[in-house]
Amino acid sequence: MEFSGPEAIDQAIQSGVDLDGSPIPVEMLNLYKDVMAKEAGRKRSGVKKSMRNRIVRTGAKHFDMAILNKRLIEAGWEGLMPNEVEFFFN
C-alpha cells in the first residue's frame, strides 16, 4: 500500500503505527501529543504568515531556492530571508 500526503502521517500517528507497519514507541507518541497540545493552545498572529511559513518549510523540499523565492514574490509575499536560505538550502 502506498501512503502519501499529510493525512497518511496523521492517520499513522493516530493509530500508533508507522507507515512501514512497525509500532511507534509510546514515549514518542506522548511527546508528540504533548507538543501538539501546546501548539494548539498557542495564540496565532495571522493566517498569511502561517501560510508563508508552511510554504517555505515544505516548498524547500520540492523547489530549488530560486524558483521558491520567485514564486513567493509573485504571490505577493516577501522573498526568502537569509536565515531561511541558510537553514533550508545550505
Image (cartoon, rainbow, N blue to C red):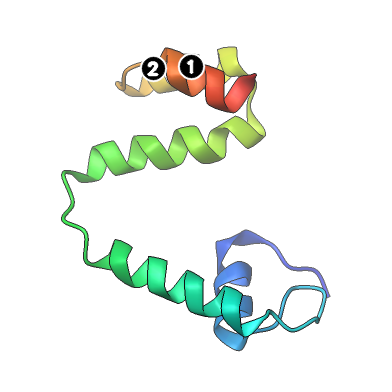
| 3 with respect to 9 (left or right) | right
- For the point 47% across and 32% down, the residue is 56
- For the point 36% across and 35% down, the residue is 52
Considering the numbered disc 1 on the image, is that residue within a helix, a strand or a loop? helix
Q: Position of residue 64 (x, y in %)?
A: 64, 20
* Neighbour tally class for label 2: few under 14, some 14-19, many 20 plus, Cα within 10 Å: few
- For the point 82% across and 74% down, the residue is 20
Determine which of the numbered discs, if any, sits on residue 60 in the image: none
- The quarter of the picture where residue 88 lies is top right
Q: What residue type is labelled 1?
A: Asn
Q: Where is residue 22 in the image (x, y as percent from the top left)?
A: 80, 81
For the N terminus, the image quarter is bottom right
Of circles 2 and 1, the one toward us is 1
Q: Name the residue under label 1.
A: 69
Query: On screen, 32 above or below 47?
Result: below
Query: On screen, 35 above or below 65?
Result: below
Compare residues 27 and 45 and report the one nearer the observer. Answer: 27
Query: On screen, 1 above or below 59?
Result: below
Determine which of the numbered discs, if any, sits on residue 74 in the image: 2
